[in-house]
Image: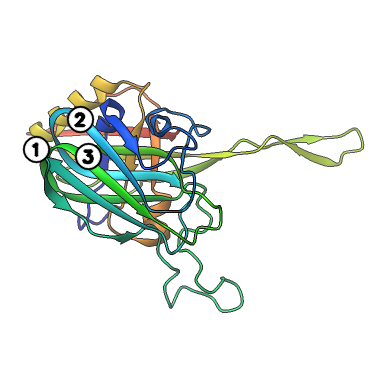
């Protein structure tokens, strides 16, 4: 894997600790703090929406992810970090999704203006920056032409992202778990029952120094296997590659590491999509 943009994990989600408000709430903004695909915040219309999160106190933040949203190709998301009411970071308006780029777009097959994340069931928009200290943040969402008639978000993640000094080793594996099951009838026709899918990611961090091993271990052991983690394997790479490898997950296996060489530790990780 390239070291140009190492994987990032938001392990401790500050959003779940925040006091929230939103411009409108057809479904409550507090649902963005709950795990489960059926819990969503929904606005009453397509006017500009501002979500404000006030933290219990100043905290380090380097990433925010707006996950499983319904924003169109024209949708934009703006992230601001604040400290004592002063803006300390402003992402500016960013497109929530990108178009299929020329060279990949196929005439007569892909729709003109089609999204480069088409096929990914959960759309997301994430913002990464250098770590800042903030006691609140604002998320401004603009998508007046949304055909749904409302704006919707399932989960929001915010926090100081963990990123290994050296990226995961080659051999990283992403599987799409398909929950459909085949059954044969008495006449031997094939019938399929069930539906749905989830991602399973396995990656080996084979080059952790002492500080990186300790930081990873403290964070993963603190949240255990019950809490959601935001995983982005190819942050800032863009396109389908980044989208397919960015999702909300829980650690699916026990945590451990091996002292493989002088001042070097190895840790295999496995994450299953929530």
Question: Which element is circle 1 on?
Answer: loop
- Measured in 3D between alpha carbons, the distance from the residue under mark 2 to the one under mark 1, in whole angstroms, is 11 Å
Q: Quadrant of the N terminus?
A: bottom left
Quadrant of the rendered image containing residue 32: top left
Q: Earlier in the sequence, mark 2 or mark 3?
A: 2
Q: Secondary structure at mark 2?
A: strand
Q: Earlier in the sequence, mark 2 or mark 1?
A: 2
Q: Which tag is nearer the camera, tag 2 or tag 1?
A: 1
Residue at coordinates 24% horizontally, 20% vertically from top-left? 222
In the displayed structure, would residue 44 be above or below residue 72? above
Q: Give the secondary structure at mark 3.
A: strand
Residue on which disc 2 sits = 55
Q: Residue at x 32, y 35 (%)?
A: 21
- Marks 2 and 3, how far apart in space? 35 Å
From the viewer's side, name the closer residue of 191 and 248: 248
Residue behind mark 3: 206
Q: Is residue 100 left or right of residue 235?
A: right
Q: Residue at x 50, y 34 (%)?
A: 37
Residue 44 position within the rendered picture, expressed as x and y whole percent measured from the top left: 49, 44
Mark 2 or mark 3: which is in front?
2
Mark count:
3
Task: Tell which of 60 and 214 is nearer to you.
Answer: 60
Looking at the image, residue 178 sits to the left or right of residue 126; the answer is right
Q: How busy is the neighbourhood of tag 2: few (under 14 within 10 Å), some, or many (20 plus)?
A: some
Give yes or no for contact between labels 3 and 1 (Cβ–Cβ under 8 Å): no
Mark 3–mark 1 Cα distance, whole angstroms, equals 41 Å
Label 3 packing within 10 angstroms: few (<14), some (14-19), many (20+): many
- The colour style of the image is rainbow
Per the image, the residue denoted by label 1 is 84
User: Residue 165 placed where, x, y %?
Assistant: 14, 45
Up-down relation of residue 99 to residue 158 (above or below): below
């Amino acid at each position: 894997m390239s070291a140009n943009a190492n994987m990032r994990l938001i392990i401790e989600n500050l959003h779940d600790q925040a006091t929230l408000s939103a411009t409108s709430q057809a479904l409550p903004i507090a649902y963005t703090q709950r795990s489960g695909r059926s819990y969503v915040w929904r606005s009453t219309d397509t006017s500009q929406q501002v979500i404000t999160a006030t933290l219990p106190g100043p905290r380090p933040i380097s990433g925010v992810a707006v996950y499983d949203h319904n924003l169109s190709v024209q949708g934009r998301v703006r992230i601001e970090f604040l400290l004592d009411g002063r803006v300390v970071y402003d992402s500016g308006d960013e497109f929530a999704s990108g178009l299929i780029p020329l060279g990949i777009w196929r005439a007569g097959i892909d729709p003109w203006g089609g999204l480069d994340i088409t096929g990914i069931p959960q759309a997301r928009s994430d913002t990464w920056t250098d770590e800042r200290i903030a006691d609140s943040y604002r998320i401004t969402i603009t998508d007046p032409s949304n055909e749904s008639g409302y704006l919707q978000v399932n989960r929001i993640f915010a926090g100081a992202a963990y990123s290994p000094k050296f990226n995961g080793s080659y051999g990283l594996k992403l599987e799409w778990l398909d929950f459909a099951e085949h059954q044969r009838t008495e006449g031997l026709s094939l019938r399929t029952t069930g539906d749905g899918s989830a991602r399973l990611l396995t990656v080996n961090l084979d080059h952790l120094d002492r500080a990186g091993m300790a930081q990873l271990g403290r964070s993963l052991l603190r949240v255990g296997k019950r809490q959601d983690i935001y995983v982005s394997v190819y942050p800032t790479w863009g396109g389908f590659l980044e989208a397919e490898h960015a999702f909300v997950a829980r650690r699916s296996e026990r945590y451990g590491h091996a002292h493989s060489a002088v001042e070097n530790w190895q840790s295999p990780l496995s994450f299953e999509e929530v």
